[in-house]
Amino acid sequence: MKKLLAAAFLSLLSLTAAAERADSLKPATIEYDSADVDGITGTRVFTGNVVLTRGTLLLKADRAVVNESPEGYMSVTLTASNGKLTTFRQKRDGGPDLWVEGQAERIEYDERSELVRLYSNALIKELENSRMTNQITGPFISYDNRKEVATVRNDVSGQTKAGGGRGTLILSPKRAPAGGAQ
């Protein structure tokens, strides 16, 4: 059982480990219905059909709070309303059509620490040529891109609680069937 869990987590690591690194050096474009900007604190609050694009990274939410540090690092909190979900999609390094997608009721991303947290109805999937290759779901998913460490917990607080929700990991075969036919 421990080997199965280890294999599952190693597979999960590939979900976002190879996100397109060049995206962080590209300008961010944010579309929205309304905005409140505080130039002193560096806080920007966007509401209404928010779409943030930065290179191949695409974030969508009902509301986004974007903070920028004096050094230029962004932290983004995306929230959904009325049972909707926030979403992200980003190309991964390593091939022409490799993507990672995710969704949750709230997504937090800290560019400085390269930490992504998905809260409530969290789902992350890896795609290759539009085909899902791996997928993980749970009430809470945290991924440290630098350390390549994922944490999935059965409660949106990020803790494991008795009687909490359950997660699912789907691992697609990595090898071709015998004889090379697919």
Image (cartoon, rainbow, N blue to C red):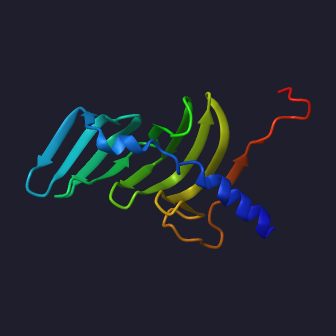
Give the side of residue 83 with respect to residue 181, left or right. left
Quadrant of the image containing the C terminus: top right
Vertical placement of residue 143 versus 161, above or below? above
Q: Residue at x 68, y 53 (%)?
A: 168
Quadrant of the image containing the N terminus: bottom right
- Judge whether residue 84 can be spotted in this image: no
Residue 129 found in image quarter:
top right
Q: Nearer the viewer, residue 34 or 40?
A: 40
Q: Residue at x 63, y 53 (%)?
A: 12
Vertical placement of residue 67 versus 182, above or below? below
The single residue placed furthest to the left in the displayed view is 40
Where in the figure is residue 53, as x and y percent of width and height?
33, 34
Residue 139 found in image quarter:
bottom right
Give the side of residue 22 with respect to residue 138, left or right. left
The single residue placed furthest to the right in the displayed view is 179
- Judge whether residue 111 can be spotted in this image: yes
Where in the figure is residue 173, as x and y percent of width and height?
78, 42
The single residue placed furthest to the bottom in the displayed view is 162
Vertical placement of residue 68 versus 80, above or below? below
Q: Residue at x 15, y 53 (%)?
A: 42
Where in the figure is residue 117, as x and y percent of width and height?
45, 57
Q: Nearer the viewer, residue 150 or 140?
A: 150
Q: Residue at x 56, y 29 (%)?
A: 97
Give the side of residue 176 with respect to residue 87, left or right. right
Q: Nearer the viewer, residue 159 or 146?
A: 146
